[in-house]
Amino acid sequence: MSNHAGEASGTMPGEFDTRHMVKRLLELGVFLGVLVIAILSFPGLDTLRDRFAQANVALLVLIGVLKLCSCLSNIVAFRDVFCPGMSWRFSFELGMAEQATNVLVPTGGAGGLALGAWALRQGGMSTEHIGRRSVAFFVLTSVPNFVCAAVFGPVLLTGLFDGKIPFIPTLVFSVLAWAAALLIFMLPRLLPDRPRATGASWANKLRAGLAIGADGIRDVGEIIRTRRWGAILGAIGYLGFDIAALLVAFAAFGDTPALGPIVFAYVVGQLGGLIPLPAGIGGTDGGLIGAMVLYGSPLSVAVAAVLAYRAFQLAVPAIIGTVS
């Protein structure tokens, strides 16, 4: 019985099986192909077709390079947060596999963490350590987004940046960003250290989960205080290179929007990715396009830039990560 259980525990969950991931990758490729055909053939899209026909090819290639840099930055942060002693090869393979899972499995970003937890558990890492470090990694890589929203929002409201700045949405999202940051800051204080709950009741499981979550947030504070630059710069690079890829996408279609509004619109638009759709298709794209138009980008430019950016955002981690 114990041997059978051990074999079962070592089996990769079905949704992360290589064949399943390859199938998802092919489905994504088919969808993108259909999208290209639609853009080329549907009536009423002449302006969009003109945008793509006049695109700067060199800048389109640069989008892919920047997206790869973003993925690699995520791996640097992942390794430093979970286990700095991991080999770089294993860190690369697992980190890219996680990012591919986030693209290909419709779980709102939770799939990658689940795959990482399974792999690390096979390597002997305790479930509790994996749990608190997963929280730490998620919070750490989200901190730059909160900082952008919390800082750029109020600054935009002062009128220091050029461009279209809708007052009410900017104010609302700025307040939400500050509220979320305050909640994360206060959670470890609201849930002080306590013995881990024992037993199988839902109440005990909830208490244990909240305690692990609070410990994970404390770990983020420790990472920042002790200046663990791998984790810190990795988290910053993960966001920074991704924003740079979007900026280059706009430049590829001949538009140079103001930096402040587009960064804030990027953070707001990415919230559409929280909808658990395959590859975030529909949620992220619609959120980004809507946010870019709201903050002053012409519709045709916003659609072209976001579609080009999203093609690389999906393809780079999906292809490399599926191989990993």
Image (cartoon, rainbow, N blue to C red):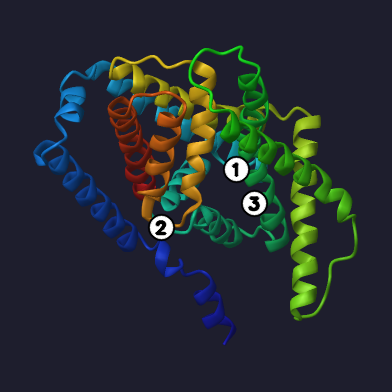
Q: Which residue is mark 1?
A: 86
- Secondary structure beneath dot 2 equals loop
Q: Considering only order in the chain, which callout, 2 or 1, is on the residue closer to the N terminus?
A: 1
Q: Which residue lies at the image location 79% right of the left edge and 53% below the top edge?
A: 214
Q: Considering only order in the chain, which callout, 1 or 3, is on the residue closer to the N terminus?
A: 1
Real-space CA distance between mark 1 and mark 2, rounded to the nearest whole angstrom: 26 Å
Instruction: For label 2, count other residues whose C-alpha is less than 10 Å away and answer few (under 14), some (14-19) or many (20+).
Output: many
Q: Which residue is mark 3?
A: 134
Asked whether the viewer can see residue 84, the reply is: no
Residue 121 percent across, percent down from the top left: 60, 61
Q: Nearer the viewer, mark 3 or mark 1?
A: 3
Q: Is residue 196 left or right of residue 136?
A: right
Amino acid at pointer 1: Met
Amino acid at pointer 2: Val
Q: Considering only order in the chain, which callout, 3 or 2, is on the residue closer to the N terminus?
A: 2
Q: Which residue lies at the image location 77% right of the left edge and 61% below the top edge?
A: 210
